[in-house]
């Protein structure tokens, strides 16, 4: 076969034999294409017939089962599958939210327990302070009751229990047995629909929690979980052996004044500046209580006292006296009780003068 065409020829003219081969190939290719298309169409027809037969069979079986329209049921099944997929997604989200709630509940319970521990610590410190004051008081002593004032707790329980028909003894039991951690967990689980088996010991507080959740009183429920009975401080007068101490509220006005003075003297070791501490205090109590307190405490603190009571000035053996002379000059004389001048001024101001003092003494000596 030549490698180049003759440049004088403008087109290639095949021989009759080659032309015949080309025509035969074209005819055979066209017939093959028609057969392939025909086979494909026939196969599709067969598949459509089979699908139609299968659909008809499904419709017949669904109709036998009581479903008139198989296509409608299929549509419902598809919708149901879509809803199930959505529910699975929501359930996954709810699970994540539930985990967050559980973690938050753990943290909340830890905070409540921390608050309870801090409250107990404060009570301990108050008792220690009362004990320290008691060491310095002569006629009284302080008592700290950690659950002495439960008025706020009772008020919250009364608000939350309305509608529960709980009786008064049940409310007292609820307050005494109140478990704040369990109360919060029960309320949270109830809101989640995950309440477990009830404990008989906490049945009253669970009724209150359920009532609060139902009525939307969640803020009051949270207040109840974080409110504790307040400490109460009571001063009581010491009495002879076998006699009960007298509470502050039952004391006379004079003894209440004495109690206040004793507390103020015993509260710290800072210097004391006071004007007429004997006011309203029974005279005997001044000598038996205030005077010994001042004599004892002056070893560690300074007392600056203005007084018209001889028990305070003379009986306390004060170290320094500033006395003001009567008259227009108002001259101030300073010294101690070893000074004759100071003793004379004390006799004048505190006893009414020598004559008054001797007259009373003579009466006392005849008694």
Image (spheres, grey):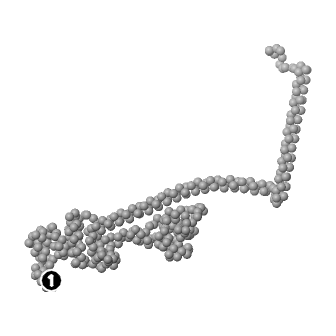
Q: Is residue 350 left or right of residue 35?
A: left
Query: Does residue 47 appear in this view?
Result: yes
Q: Is residue 309 left or right of residue 63?
A: left
Q: Is residue 330 left or right of residue 148?
A: left
Q: Is residue 255 above or below residue 53?
A: below
* Location of residue 90 by image quarter: bottom right
Residue located farthest toward the front when viewing the structure as drawn:
242
* Location of residue 206 by image quarter: bottom right
Percent x, y of residue 186: 55, 64
* Residue lying at 91% horizontally and 23% vertically, measured from the top left: 20
- Counting every numbered tag in the picture gives 1
* Residue lying at 88% horizontally and 38% vertically, measured from the top left: 38
Percent x, y of residue 240: 29, 76
Neighbor class of circle 1 (other Cα within 10 Å; few <14, some 14-19, many 20+) is: few
Q: Is residue 119 above or below residue 350?
A: above
Question: Circle 1 sits on which residue?
Answer: 364
Query: Does residue 356 appear in this view?
Result: no
Q: Quadrant of the N terminus?
A: top right
Query: In the depicted view, which residue is nearer to us: 45 or 189?
Result: 189
Percent x, y of residue 225: 48, 65
Q: Is residue 172 above or below residue 98?
A: below
Q: Is residue 156 left or right of residue 313?
A: right
* Residue lying at 88% horizontally and 25% vertically, measured from the top left: 22
Percent x, y of residue 133: 30, 67
Query: In the depicted view, which residue is nearer to us: 1 or 36?
Result: 36
* Residue lying at 14% horizontally and 78% vertically, measured from the top left: 351
Q: In terms of secondary structure, where does tag 1 sit?
A: helix
Q: Is residue 115 above or below residue 348?
A: above
Residue located farthest toward the left when viewing the structure as drawn:
340
Q: Quadrant of the C terminus?
A: bottom left
């Amino acid at each position: 076969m030549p490698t180049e065409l003759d440049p004088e020829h403008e087109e290639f003219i095949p021989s009759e034999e080659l032309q015949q081969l080309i025509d035969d190939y074209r005819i055979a290719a066209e017939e093959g294409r028609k057969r392939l298309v025909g086979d494909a169409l026939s196969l599709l027809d067969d598949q459509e017939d089979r699908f139609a037969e299968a659909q008809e069979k499904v419709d017949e079986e669904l109709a036998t089962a009581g479903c008139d329209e198989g296509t409608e049921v299929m549509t419902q099944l598809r919708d149901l599958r879509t809803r199930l997929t959505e529910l699975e997604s929501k359930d996954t989200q709810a699970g994540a939210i539930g985990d967050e709630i559980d973690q938050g509940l753990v943290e909340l319970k830890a905070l409540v327990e921390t608050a309870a521990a801090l409250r107990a610590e404060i009570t301990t410190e108050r008792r220690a302070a009362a004990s320290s004051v008691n060491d310095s008081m002569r006629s009284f002593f302080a008592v700290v009751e950690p659950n002495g004032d439960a008025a706020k707790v009772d008020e919250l329980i009364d608000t939350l229990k309305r509608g529960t028909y709980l009786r008064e003894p049940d409310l007292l039991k609820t307050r005494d047995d109140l478990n704040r951690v369990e109360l919060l967990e029960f309320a949270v689980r109830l809101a989640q629909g995950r309440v477990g088996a009830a404990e008989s010991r906490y049945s009253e507080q669970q009724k209150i929690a359920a009532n609060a959740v139902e009525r939307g009183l969640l803020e009051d429920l949270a207040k109840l979980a974080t409110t504790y009975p307040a400490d109460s401080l009571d001063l009581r007068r010491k009495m002879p052996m076998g006699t009960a101490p007298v509470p502050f509220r039952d004391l006379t006005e004079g003894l209440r004044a004495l109690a206040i003075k004793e507390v103020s003297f015993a509260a710290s070791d800072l210097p004391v500046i006071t004007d007429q501490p004997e006011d309203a205090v029974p005279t005997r109590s001044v000598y038996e209580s205030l005077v010994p307190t001042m004599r004892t405490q002056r070893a560690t603190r300074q007392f600056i006292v203005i007084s018209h009571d001889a028990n305070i000035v003379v009986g306390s053996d004060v170290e320094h006296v500033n006395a003001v002379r009567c008259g227009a000059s108002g001259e101030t004389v300073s010294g101690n009780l070893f000074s004759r001048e100071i003793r004379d001024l004390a006799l004048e101001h505190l006893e009414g003068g020598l004559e008054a003092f001797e007259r009373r003494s003579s009466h006392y000596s005849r008694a």
